[in-house]
Amino acid sequence: MKRALLYLAGGTAVSFLLNYFLLGSQGWELDLYYGFAFGSAWGMAYFLDDPKFTLPQKLGISFLGMGLLVLIGFLLFGLELAVPSVIKFSMVFVAYYLIASFKPSKSLRN
């Protein structure tokens, strides 16, 4: 759990700094929100990369995370700006498991 929180914080910080300083800022609040979507995807993917979670549980928890991101984004920025956060979340989540699939253990934890 501690490492998953580190991935959340690190992913949020790196994504925020890249968006804010290098990729063209859309306002620090929105950049922070998109950074949080990126970091939460890495943290959640790492947390769920455990044999104790079944595939349906992993899918359900990730969809719950995406729904929560949309809700937060909708309340703060509107639906049009909230949808890209789900796309970022999904891409990072899939990338994590794609990278893990190349390892014999099918996990990045081991």
Image (tube, rainbow, N blue to C red):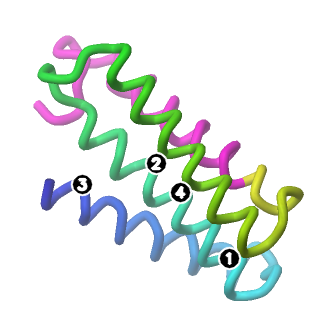
Q: Residues within 10 Å of mark 1 (few under 14, many from 20)?
A: many
Q: CA distance from mark 1 to mark 3?
A: 21 Å
Q: Which residue is mark 3?
A: 4
Q: Residues within 10 Å of mark 3 (few under 14, many from 20)?
A: some
The x, y position of residue 107, in whole percent, is 22, 25
Q: CA distance from mark 3 to mark 4?
A: 13 Å
Residue sitting nearer the eye, 98 or 9: 9
Q: CA distance from mark 2 to mark 4?
A: 5 Å
Tag 3 or tag 1, which sits nearer the N-term?
A: 3
* Mark 2 and mark 4 residues within 8 Å of each other at the beta carbon: yes
Residue sitting nearer the eye, 17 or 9: 9
Q: Residues within 10 Å of mark 4 (few under 14, many from 20)?
A: many
Q: Which residue is mark 4?
A: 38
Q: Residue at x 20, y 12 (%)?
A: 104
Q: Residue at x 51, y 29 (%)?
A: 94
Residue stretch rendered in magenta on the structure:
85-110
Tag 4 or tag 3, which sits nearer the N-term?
A: 3
* Mark 3 and mark 2 residues within 8 Å of each other at the beta carbon: no
The x, y position of residue 50, in whole percent, is 17, 28
Q: Which residue is mark 2?
A: 41
